[in-house]
Amino acid sequence: MNRVKLRENTFKLLYCNDFHNRSEMPKQYDLFWEETPEVSEEDRKFISNRVDAIAEKIDEIDEAINKAAVKWTTDRMSKVDLTILRLAYYEMKIDEDIPEKVAVDQAIELAKKYGTDDSPSFVNGVLAKLF
């Protein structure tokens, strides 16, 4: 699976985290994998590990997003936009395997695909202040 698809599936599973408590996530993972049988075992492991790593750093990530998002807080943001920002922040500041420009571009693409008409500019604006 290519990096774009890995990121998209990571986004989807990370989005699920906002609606379930941590103890429910193993079951949610199982349900997600049932719906995405094309994802290999190796890719499932990569995606799950990434989602778990982001969940472990969620307070740090949200604090940084709150500082960068003028007149917005994470509890007021759309769940889609917030999930995209969390993933992009993790890729750029914590994991650092992905060049910042690529992470920003891919975050904007996710916002275009899954967010509202305002999502791409909102995500771009917050990420610009973060980096």
Image (spheres, grey):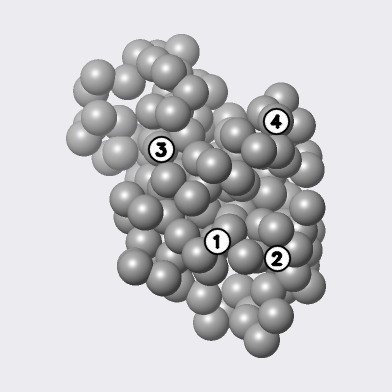
Q: Where 41 sits versus 8, above or below?
A: above
* Amino acid type, mark 1: Val
* Amino acid type, mark 2: Ile
Q: Are marks 1 and 3 in contact (CB under 8 Å)?
A: no
For the residues marked 4 and 1, what is the alpha-carbon distance in whole angstroms? 17 Å
Going 30% across and 38% down the picture, which residue do you hit?
Answer: 32
Q: Are marks 1 and 2 in contact (CB under 8 Å)?
A: no
Whichever of labels 4 and 2 marks the residue nearer the N terminus, that label is: 2
Q: Are marks 3 and 2 in contact (CB under 8 Å)?
A: no
For the residues marked 1 and 3, what is the alpha-carbon distance in whole angstroms? 16 Å
Q: Quadrant of the N terminus?
A: top left
Disc 4 residue crowd, few under 14, some 14–19, many 20+, Cα 10 Å: few
For the residues marked 4 and 2, what is the alpha-carbon distance in whole angstroms? 19 Å
For the residues marked 3 and 4, what is the alpha-carbon distance in whole angstroms? 17 Å
Which mark is in front, 1 or 2?
Answer: 1
Q: What residue is disc 2 on?
A: 65
The answer to whether residue 21 is left or right of residue 90 is left
Taking depth in this image into account, of 67 and 20 the one nearest to the observer is 67
Q: Is residue 76 visible?
A: yes
